[in-house]
Image (cartoon, rainbow, N blue to C red):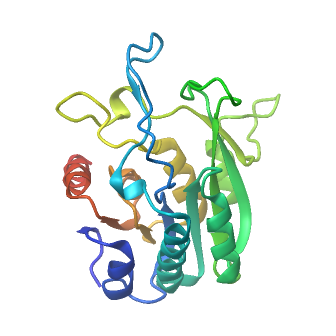
């Protein structure tokens, strides 16, 4: 089995044919949330510039199609994980139900549902709901004896006790949407990938649930944040991405790391 590689293709097929069974220590997955289709945009936004809602073909499925898709990729991930491995799945209120159902069907143990509070959340354009300022990351484990580096996570927790000492990290993470130098941009200067996740998020996940030399896999690699952070902290890595333009961007990012 090849390691330290980015595959261009369907994650279910690659997980089942290129990745050995029970070989992966940690999976981070940021699957399509299935919320595209309305083409909402806000040009001339005074606070953050032009804003476009995710509107990609890979993010458009019927409800039954999305359920089958979720069953297939989580099932393939279950096969690839070691018996004490962890999977972290990014989601929103749009798809958390499907993800939780499939995790329970496969007898995963859900340890936490981390709430990501986006301190610079996108504006509420419709003015008919509360502004959506949170997403979630589900942490689930296959079997018992999972890895959790409790002391390591206390050290990197930005929150401290009143006396300045280390504090337990809670399941509420406050961090902004990716911006500035960290944001990958295309030749048109727009965000290259609509759902690029913060490096800080992957740092916490990788340091919490893997050790140096462990294998980290991302079946929806996108702009390459997972493999970039895994390499930075001495982990082996495998990325899978269907869209060629993102594969090229991720490989370019890895070559700079």
What residue is at 68 percent from the left and 72 percent from the top?
A: 101
What residue is at 63 percent from the left and 66 percent from the top?
A: 98
What residue is at 36 percent from the left and 49 percent from the top?
A: 56
Q: Viewed as shown, does residue 74 lie left or right of 45?
A: right
What residue is at 74 percent from the left and 66 percent from the top?
A: 111
What x and y, as percent, mark residue 110?
72, 69
Viewer can see residue 239: yes
Q: Relative to 131, is 144 above or below? A: below
What x and y, as percent, mark residue 31?
47, 60
Q: Relative to 204, is 129 above or below? A: above
Q: Nearer the viewer, residue 158 or 78?
A: 78
Viewer can see residue 148: no
What x and y, as percent, mark residue 226?
41, 56
Q: Viewed as shown, does residue 4 lie left or right of 155?
A: left
Picture quadrant where residue 157 is located: top right
Q: Nearer the viewer, residue 249 or 159?
A: 249
Q: Relative to 171, is 119 above or below? A: above
């Amino acid at each position: 089995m090849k390691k330290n590689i980015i595959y261009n293709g369907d994650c279910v097929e690659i997980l089942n044919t290129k990745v050995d069974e029970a070989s992966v220590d940690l999976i981070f997955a940021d699957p399509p949330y299935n919320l595209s289709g309305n083409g909402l945009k806000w040009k001339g936004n005074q606070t953050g510039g032009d804003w476009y809602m995710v509107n990609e073909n890979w993010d458009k499925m019927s409800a039954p199609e999305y359920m089958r898709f979720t069953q297939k990729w989580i099932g393939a991930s279950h096969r690839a994980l070691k018996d004490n491995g962890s999977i972290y799945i990014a989601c929103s209120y749009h798809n958390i139900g499907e993800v939780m159902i499939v995790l329970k069907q496969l007898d995963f143990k859900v340890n936490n549902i981390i709430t990501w509070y986006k301190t610079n959340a996108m504006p509420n354009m419709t003015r008919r709901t509360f502004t959506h300022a949170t997403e979630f990351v589900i942490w689930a484990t296959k079997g018992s004896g999972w890895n959790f580096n409790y002391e390591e996570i206390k050290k990197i927790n930005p929150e401290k006790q009143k006396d300045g000492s280390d504090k337990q990290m809670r399941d509420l993470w406050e961090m902004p949407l990716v911006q500035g130098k960290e944001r990958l941009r295309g030749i048109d200067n727009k965000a290259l990938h609509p759902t690029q996740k913060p490096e800080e998020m992957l740092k916490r996940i990788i340091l919490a649930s893997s050790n140096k030399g462990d294998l980290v896999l991302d079946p929806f690699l996108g702009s390459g944040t997972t493999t970039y952070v895994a390499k930075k902290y001495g982990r082996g890595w495998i990325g899978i991405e269907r869209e060629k333009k993102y594969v090229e961007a991720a490989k370019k990012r890895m070559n700079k790391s």
